[in-house]
Image (tube, coloured by chain):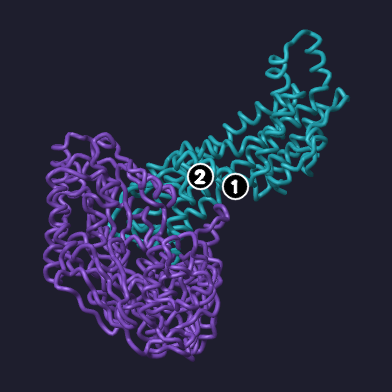
Amino acid sequence: MTRTHSSLTELTEEQEAATVTPSDDPAAPRRRWWQARTEASRIWRQPVVVVALLVAGAWLVVAIAAPLLAPFDPLQQSSDVYASPGGDHLFGTDALGRDVLSRVIYGARLSIPLALTIVLCALAFGGLLGLVAGYVRGIIGESIMRLTDLFFAFPQIILAMAVAAAFGPSTLNAVVALVIVSWPIYARVIRGAVLSIRSEDYLNASRMLGVGPVAALRRDVMPNSFGPAVVLATLELGNSMLLLAALSFLGLGPRPPAAEWGAMIALGTNDISRWWVSVFPGLAILTVVMACNIIGDALRDRFDPQSVGGR
Amino acid sequence: MSIAISSARGLRPTRYAAVAVGAAVLVSGCTAGSSSSSGGSGGNGGGGGGGGGETLLVNTSFVYSTLDPARAYEQTGYLTIHSLCDTLMTFDGGNVGEPLPELAEGFEVSEDGTTYTFTLRDDAVFSDGSPVTSEDVLFSLNRMMNVKGSGSAFFEGLEFSAPDESTVVVTADRPTAEVPTLMAMPVTSILNQEVATANGATDAEDAETADTAQTFLDSTSACAGPYVLERNDPGNEIVLTANEEYWGEAPGYSRVVIRNADAQNQKLAISRSQGDEIALDVTGNLLDGLPESVNVSQVEDTLYMLYMSTDPAISPATSNPDWRAALRSSLDYEGLAGLYGQGGDRLGGFLANAYPGSLPVEEGPERDLDAARASLEASGVGDEPVRFIYPSITYRGVDLGTVATKIQGDAAEAGINLELTPLALPAFLEEQRGGSVVMGLTPHALIYPRPESLVRQLSPGGVNAERVRWSDGPAAEEVTAAAERVLTAVDGTELESALVDWQQAMRDGSPYLPVAQNSGSVVSTEDVADAEYTPAGWILDLAAVEPA
């Protein structure tokens, strides 16, 4: 089951702390590792996960090998406007006679790396703030978390639209806008993870050995708290792609004539009787986002102790 | 021009459209358009199903803020007000070449072209049965001027008087041929002075603040028109019923429901309708795929134009005449016109075909990539990116982003580097007003159907010229002289000759580049007759529409 964004935002601190469960049993780590390996092997053999991995892998190949796979230059205009799918143009052409298949293929080069960039930047920024908020606590930690609450108070797409519109439409500004609206969830999850391990014996031991807070964060806290965030990042990859496409759909993403899936859908909605202009980029988004979500689900089942697979 | 589509293709299977919509919704749940109405089957929204002819259903994307004639300025407001309120003059269908008398029996013009004397009909009455007098006309015209609505700007320099009960005199501070046309604009609608005054209207000089009749006029008509207002629900529908006291010919339908719907829904509705139904925003490429049974009336009345700053401090490229010449030679005008679908065409000059003085298409610019490259080299500008703004809207069925992208692609083939910058409409207008636009694309429809309005706006000293900082230079002087001849021409032949000179002067030296013209359209079902598009400003004379 995919955990929704809103349910994550409603996690209480106790629930956050429970996402990583400490144990006093010295044999527990080895036992958990063995159980996890068995579970992992079962999870990755599920047909739906296998298909998702294949789809995600296929899109990565498409993105990397776009110049080899695309039959036409995605920006090349022609007089063959609104050609139906088939013949020379498998996915048809758009209002400017551009090959839709080539634009969908090149769109992968834009949408997938940008979604990854958004997730990584948000993970880095939100993760850092979450680490500090969980480890330092006090007024600094509280301030960070109240700031996080403030961001959660706005619907993501509305806030992203406001930021992107204020900066002006461009690829960089769309990415910045989406990083700004995406980081809080990472801050909250990582803070929860840090809260659950900050009283662990190994941290107390390192403190007694004189290890400073920065070194402790870097060496002990960070590696042990990023697991849930990585799972979340995989789930958020699909969400980031949708948000990016939504901004582009609204004219706030990469500038024309760039082949971006959301912008291509927007172009197609001018005349829905030419269904191929918007359906194929829509299917591209659908498949990538579904693949990301299924893989994220599988990862969550694998790592989350609260889920069936993770138990 | 009114044409009937004879070879339209059928709609694609609905399931594909549904998938397309579904895919679009997948993106964000955000869909374009602002309509609050459904695109359900037509012919039943107002009881017009079955082709009974009692009720006519008119679908349009609502654009209006008021039905007060003095304050109205938008398309839907004009459409409605024209059916509620008669004016001194009017136009017959789509022919805007010659204004015809309506509440006036006729007019006389002085030899110097400055004084117009209108004689009123003696049988015209308001919807309450009281007669229309020159006092009502004078009150309505003075109120329009003093309320200072957007439409009043075109009446500057005019004064009104009523020497007797059936005569109204309009005096201009210059010779002009525009007065009869101006007296047909919906802002000059004649109000029942007694009713309007009782509900807060005033024609005093402080009417801008003292007049409080807008709320009343948004819910009740106090005019002498073929219809009266039954209901005004701004988000959903406007309902008109026939004026039982109307002095003229009774309208074809006893009831008209004007319904708010976006263009895509209008297309679906008109395609499936079995009743008396009309769509006003199905135009451009949206006309493709309509059933063969529908009637389409189109008039080429909209100009699409590039404008470029002449200030070197703003752009060394666009201020360079050679660079502008390179851009002019680089564009594929035939391909650009094709983007507008059935209603699009190339332009010969600056005036769309609907207006007198328009030049033949053959006189328009042609694509010549070699000449473009040579001009670009002569300019010495190189391939520095030039910021090219446009509003990210769909206007009359055509996405301006698609037009801009086509221009960018064409120019790139000649080595010209345009940086596409789509802007939301408010941001676009704000940047335009700021006067720092490097290069922009905008549709240009005449605010009232006289070419003088375009001449006034584009020539040095006009609103558009100020935006591109075009005020001096040999070309500006030549255009100013030609514009003066246009604006003072009283005779029709003299006007057409002056317009030709003006357009030729503009073509050679102005910072504007017209790229194509497009049509406004009225699409009606086979149960409806005489649904004719007019470039007069009100799109369609609802009273003239009849059951087939």
Mark 1 secondary-structure assignment: helix
Q: Is residue B409 visible?
A: yes
Image point 25% across, 46% down: which residue? B411
The label shown at residue A59 is 2
Q: CA distance from mark 1 to mark 2?
A: 10 Å
Image quarter of residue A57? top right
Give the chain letter for purple: B
Give the chain letter for cyan: A
Which chain does tag 1 point to? Answer: A
Under mark 2, the amino acid is: Trp
Under mark 1, the amino acid is: Ala
Q: Which residue is denoted by mark 1 in the rendering?
A: A291
Which chain does tag 2 point to? Answer: A
- Judge left or right: residue B164 versus residue B319: right
Counting residues from the start of the chain, the first of labels 1 and 2 encountered is: 2
Residue A161, horizontal then vertical, whole percent: 54, 45
Q: Nearer the viewer, residue B239 or B396?
A: B239
How many numbered marks are there?
Answer: 2
- Judge left or right: residue B128 versus residue A96: right
Give yes or no for contact between labels 1 and 2 (Cβ–Cβ under 8 Å): yes
Query: Considering only vertical position in the picture, is A10 above or below B93?
Result: above
